[in-house]
Amino acid sequence: MHVGLVTRSEVEYVLDLANDLNEAGMSVTLYMCHAHTVREVDTPDRTVERLYEVGLIPRECKVRLIRLPRMRDPRSFALFHRLSQTMRDDGIDVAHILVTPGELWFAVLACLLRDIPVTSTMIVPKPNVGEDLPTLVVLAIYKLLAYGSDVVIVNGADQVALVQKLYGIPASRIAYVPLGVRKTAFRWSTRAVPEEPGTILFFGRAHLHKGLEYLVRAQPIITRQIPHARILISAHGKDLERCRQMIQDSSRFEIHEGFVPGNVMATFFQRASLVALPYLSAASSGVLMTAYVFGKPVVATNISGLSEYVEEGVTGLLVRPADVEQLADAIVRLLSDDTLRHRVGETATRWVSEQRNNIATQTLQAYQRAICVHQNALD
């Protein structure tokens, strides 16, 4: 089976999936956004070769980088029409498109590939709190994606019923596949970086639904009990500046604004004593899975999309969303108990290792289902 993986922004997700499929004996071609992939490897002139050099993907996997116009640019239709033809010329047996909210042309691509079975992953099936696009626009794009897809994959067990209800997809065309291990993230750790005691990492998108403000507000409570504690923020997004204005003691923070390449990301996770995910809403979290693969315990909010992957007291601690004191108390608990923190981190690493084989098997089952649905539709 020749699988075509397509994404704009979920580069790490696709790289991990490509590795799993390759190990399962599948032929894989990746179609990835040029700009997002360059950010990941930080080598604009030799991006693809760098992916192979670091070992992020095996050389058996082919890579095609797509230079995308702005999402609202009508020229995108012609580009995606050409992409659909390129995928046919490449001999793709199953297309797997990974889509986040607002990525209209990737939903259009699913409709253009009428002669190829299409599996799509709705990364965020329901718009998060404070999403940039109006909810009706996001839902309309996902409905188009559902129309063009033979099977829709979700990464949360409770999202099966949600997607059925929102987009009118029958259960037979929905596959639940748990979020995969971010093992390619770990491959960036080419040198050992010691953990820095008391370092709390917030990583990723600074958006309203990520709840960064609650971590900022928790800082005075944390440092009263753990004087050496510091918060390391590596983030991009419009909410970062608002949260920066809320900081009471800037000496307690280290802030890196913007996207960082994979080697810098790996350094940040190695430095951290724990990773904080104070989210208000989430469908899933690549940051969570990255923390696990680096053996870092997490403090996360008890919301759908996180609680499924965090076992209380075993792989992390769960707190109520928007509860500053409970968030601070959980962080203090881990920072003040090295034995507990290390045990939780080690358990998280074992857990993601056990998950790996299951993910590949379930993804391949989704592809087989897509082929059957597609064939039945032709008949």
Image (tube, helix red, strand yellow):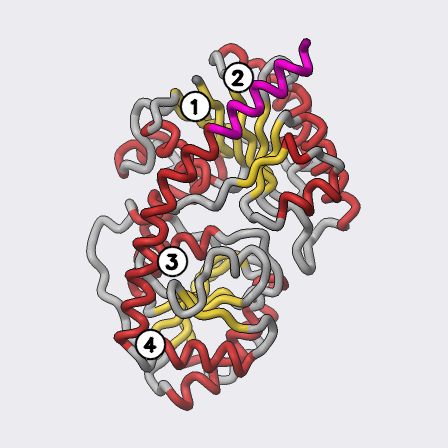
C-alpha distance separating marks 1 and 4:
42 Å
Q: Secondary structure at mark 3?
A: helix
- Count how many numbered circles sit on residues in the image: 4
Q: Position of residue 130 (x, y in %)?
A: 69, 59
Tell me the amino acid under the disc marked 2: Met
Q: Earlier in the sequence, mark 1 or mark 4?
A: 1
Above or below, 128 against 119 in this view is below
Above or below, 362 against 115 in this view is below
Q: Is residue 337 left or right of residue 288?
A: left
Q: Earlier in the sequence, mark 3 or mark 4?
A: 4
Asked if labels 4 and 3 touch by Cβ distance under 8 angstroms, the answer is no
Q: Which residue is mark 1?
A: 29
Tell me the amino acid under the disc marked 1: Thr
C-alpha distance separating marks 1 and 3:
28 Å
Magenta stretch in the rendered image: 365-379
Q: Secondary structure at mark 2?
A: helix
Q: Residue furthest bottom?
A: 224
Q: Residue furthest right?
A: 136
- Magenta part, dominant SS: helix
C-alpha distance separating marks 3 and 2:
34 Å
Q: Earlier in the sequence, mark 1 or mark 3?
A: 1
Q: Which residue is mark 4?
A: 198
Between 118 and 347, the one nearer to me in the picture: 347
- Camera-near label (3 vs 2) is 3
